[in-house]
Amino acid sequence: MFHSRRETAKRGAVSRRLVNEYIQEGGIDSHTMRDLVASIRVVGTEDFVCEEWVEEPTLLVTRFEYANMFHTVTDWYSAYVSSRVTGLPNRPHVVFIDGHCTTHLEETWTALFSAIRYAKNFSKPVCFRHAVLSPLGYETALVKGLSEEIDCKGESVQSLWQNPNVKKTARLSEFGEMIRSAFRFPVNRHRSSETSSSSSPLHNVLFVRREDYLAHPRRGGKVQFRLINEEEVFESLHHWVASGSTGLKKCGINLVNGLFAHMSMKNQVKAIQDASVIIGAHGAGLTHIVSATPNTRIFEIVSVEFQSPHFEPIAKWKDLEFQRPHFELIAKWKGLEYHAMHLANSRADPTAVIEKLKKIMKSFGC
């Protein structure tokens, strides 16, 4: 039940000891879930007043980095896992209990869940028959795996049903299928290559483009350049493919310009689903690989600022700013083949990128 702060001066429902034991401070300066759980109060029947009852199972979600793609995916994943482990319906209701506003990423929240509401807009006491507090995205494996070793590899659901293995997981693959299903894309078939004019298999190679990233104002508002010659690299790839002299005799390439900043989320997910190879500079747009289909190859171009010392668990939270094997780990937990090009600075040699892609394409039998 949500009440105003003046009505919470009752007996605490959760002791400080339990809060400290189960919701540790970790590396987050302001762990909003700690304050939220600590504020829960037990009230008597005379003080228990509801003007609205929500009968449907509901996830109570606190978004932290609400406008960033990677962190929003961790929130989606946390909500998904919360639904699974508590046995909620496939598309429960969601109530945002943070103070953030609407963003362009609400399109996916709405697709994934049956209803979205904002607690900050409640004008009267609201009570829930069945509410589940969804952990912060920072508490998911997608982030925890950066500072802790999670010895686990991805596998398909069908394979794990037949051969259970505690060292393998289908959880992230299931999550990707949930996203594809939310946008009404098929999830029970593998991607099939089209045929080129020469009757050879035609593979989509998706180049995930990005605009220079302006960090959040509370982090200094610094522009971060991930790949300063991205346009040059893309144009070189385009010329290589268009020339017809790729050196690949048994298949063709359709190079897709992944300008995600100018595409709807549904079209972004479709581009990911249809790709045989996903290329991109390190950045939040690559988080979309959670929706990639089996046998997709991931090719990440990593500038020197974002390289980790291959790739030991990161000891200090502050080190995450510059040592980020996010997408190598996601690929591992999905069971996808991962390739990286580690740069000496923020500029990639287009010829080297083409040669790397050519080797990847040959793994398809091209």
Image (cartoon, rainbow, N blue to C red):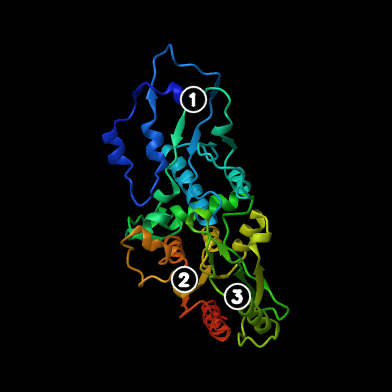
Residue 295 relative to residue 251: left or right = left
Mark 2 Cα shell of 10 Å, populated few (<14), some (14-19), many (≥20): some
Instruction: Check the image and report above or below for 175 versus 130.
Output: below
Instruction: Work out how far the residue at label 2 is from the one at label 1, CA to CA, in angstroms.
Output: 50 Å
Q: Examine the rendered structure and indicate whether residue 291 appears above or below residue 62.
A: below
What is the x, y in percent for residue 254? Answer: 67, 74
Query: Can you say whether 280 is above or below 11 in the image?
Result: below
Residue 150 visible in image: no
Identity of the residue furthest to the right in this view: 197
Secondary structure at numbered mark 3: helix
Query: Label 1 is placed on what type of residue?
Result: Ser
Question: Rounded to the nearest whole Å, what is the CA distance between mark 3 and mark 1?
Answer: 50 Å
Q: Which mark is on residue 4?
A: 1
In the image, 271 versus 36, the foreground residue is 36
Residue at position x 36%, y 55% from top? 164
Mark 3 and mark 2 lie on one chain; the one further toward the N terminus is 3
Residue 220: x and y in percent read 49, 59
The label on residue 230 is 3
Q: Tell me the tag on residue 338.
A: 2
Disc 3 versus disc 1: nearer the observer? 1
Lower sequence index among marks 3 and 1: 1
**Viewer-proximal residue among 118 and 90:** 118
Q: Residue furthest front?
A: 220
Neighbours of disc 3 within 10 Å: few (<14), some (14-19), many (20+): many
**Element on which disc 1 rests:** loop
- Residue appearing at x 46%, y 80% in the figure: 344
When asked about the image quadrant of residue 293, the answer is: bottom right
Give, as a three-letter code, the residue at label 3. Answer: Glu
